[in-house]
Image (cartoon, coloured by chain):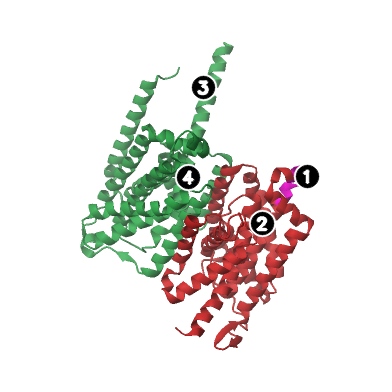
Amino acid sequence: MRIETFLQTLVFGLFTGGIYGVAAMGLALVFGVLKMLNIAHGELVMLGGYVSFWVFSAFGIDPFASLVIVIPALFIVGLALDRTVYRHIVRLLGEEKIKNSMLVSFGLTLVLQNLAQWLFTADERSIQVAYAGDGFNIYGVLLPYTRLATLGIALAAILALNYFLHKTYPGKAILATAEDFESAELAGINIHRVYMMTFALGASLAAIAGTFVTVTYGLSPSIGIIWTLKALIVIVLAGTGSILGAFPAGILLGVVEALSGTFIDPSYHEVVGLVIFILVLIVRPQGLFTRK
Amino acid sequence: MTLSKTTSRFLSIAGMILFIVFAFYYPRYVDKQNVWNLFFLICLQITIGQSWNILGGFAGQTSLGHAAFFGIGALVTRTLWLDGQPFAIAFALGGLVAVTFGMLIGAPTFRLRGAYFAIGTLGVAEVLRITVSQKIPYISTMSGALIASYDLSARYHLALGLAIVTTGVAYLLLRSPWSLGIQAVREDEEAAQATGVHVLRHKLLALALSSFFTGLAGGVFAYQQISYYPSAPFSPIWTFDALLITFIGGQGTLIGPVIGAIFFVYVRDKLSVNLVDIHQVIFGVLFILIVLVFPGGLVEAWERLKKSLLNTKYTKVAKD
């Protein structure tokens, strides 16, 4: 095996993992705070991708710059979904809440996917920026600018989220609600506003992931469920309570997938994640990145 | 006036027999392609819905990947059958392989509470769909000899038989001593455990029955379709159909999936002609509304209606 092949695979795994990480952080945030599992998270990734695609094709705005539009757009979509649908589930307790959130969001998956197909057709789309093929070449290992930009923005997003959650008042309110919603409410936190904001924030993270997907892969109305699945595997890997732990777990999944795809058989690419999921449940069900 | 228990049981058995006789003779009497197809689909969906109901409604374990079992059943049956094996063997093996996959995913995930089982089933279904579409990307078509001797009524009778057997097994399960354990697991896992119910065993039993019959339904699909992409039965739409049917009818009830399947297949048949693009959106919204507003489905609606009618009658009598 040539060392360049190995390094190149590793680097691309890292890039892909960064996207998984961002997508999974959004899902983990919603799961950790609202205690709901949003199966339609991948559909938010897909919608984010479409916003970025249309902004690019209508106004020619660079996809990375278009994040300024895409993020607020999906923040609003998140608010709307929370107000219309998820608000009714957040009131329930325990198992009932998780179960109903899964059922409802599974139904929502179908609604959003078919709406997207109706509005945008089933054609596969992608954004080709002028500098798509360019990049650094370090000892035969290619580092495309687009991929570097996705990883850079992903890192910036996790740092910003970290700062927001731990250093600002609304962030601390979110963490307090995640910890114990009753105490948080008693302490004067408006937990329903926290839930709404958290869901919208999760949708915004999905929007970032969606933009990356559109730039690096392709976009079609049916990609949602795959991204939900990746994000789910990542949060099981990280441990279901861990929000920021989702990022390193995403990187790990990306790298393992890339390596096994190159060195075992590319057509079993998807199986790897599932095998990891089951192994983690058997060996370490609390996840890899939790202290408990 | 309330009916005595024996009378009401006699009536429901008589109703069921009438229903089966109708289902057996009506398509034969009309003998039109679209009627055969509609009745076939209803029976197939009853099986899938009832299977989901055994696991999700009786035992309370939400599966988001029943398409996996359906797809496996279809894949195994189709491959063996077109390979020249007797259909009966291929059909049974399809069900058994589906159970094997069910156990593989159920054993590690059922030990944990919460969403793990749902994530696991969703994962298996999607991974199989993608892997099958990459490994077997070409259409599977019946051979010319099979097409020449193709008889839709045989397919329909197999589907009808399977729907009856699945519903019968669900009925027997409800009347067996296992049903108490299974329902206890649904209502409160910890309390069930504390009273000595072996939680994992009961969950696995429900999963085994559920995945077996879904796998067989996949086999029926493989037997009926002249040509299809092998990845098509793995599509998440099959899982969604099972969920929608169970919830329209009434989850956790025996008759729910039957009513749900008849309603769903009939309405979809009408909607998909007029609203090709957005009929799935309508069903998605309907499903969300049922889960949020009316989780008991049509069976509960009927019970409530009956109760309110009886109540008004009683109050009238009291006033007189």
Kind of residue indicated by mark 4: Gln
Mark yes or no: residue B108 visible. yes
Query: Dot 1 falls on which chain?
Result: A
Q: How far apart, in angstroms, are the residues tagged by discs 2 and 1?
A: 26 Å
Name the mark on residue A78. Answer: 2
Kind of residue indicated by mark 1: Ala
For this view, does B31 lie left or right of residue B5?
Answer: left
Kind of residue indicated by mark 3: Leu
Are the residues flagged by discs 4 and 1 from a single subunit?
A: no
Q: Residues within 10 Å of mark 2 (few under 14, many from 20)?
A: many
**Circles 4, 2 touching at the beta carbon (< 8 Å):** no
Quadrant in which the C terminus of chain A is drawn: bottom right
Q: How far apart, in angstroms, are the residues tagged by discs 4 and 2?
A: 28 Å
For marks 4 and 3, give the one nearer the viewer.
Answer: 4
Secondary structure at numbered mark 1: loop
For marks 2 and 1, give the one nearer the viewer.
Answer: 1
Which residue in the structure is indicated by mark 3?
B310
Kind of residue indicated by mark 2: Gly
Q: Which chain is green?
A: B
Residue A19 vs residue B113, the one in the foreground: B113
Chain A tint in image: red
Range of the magenta residues?
A184-194
Q: How far apart, in angstroms, are the residues tagged by discs 3 and 2?
A: 45 Å
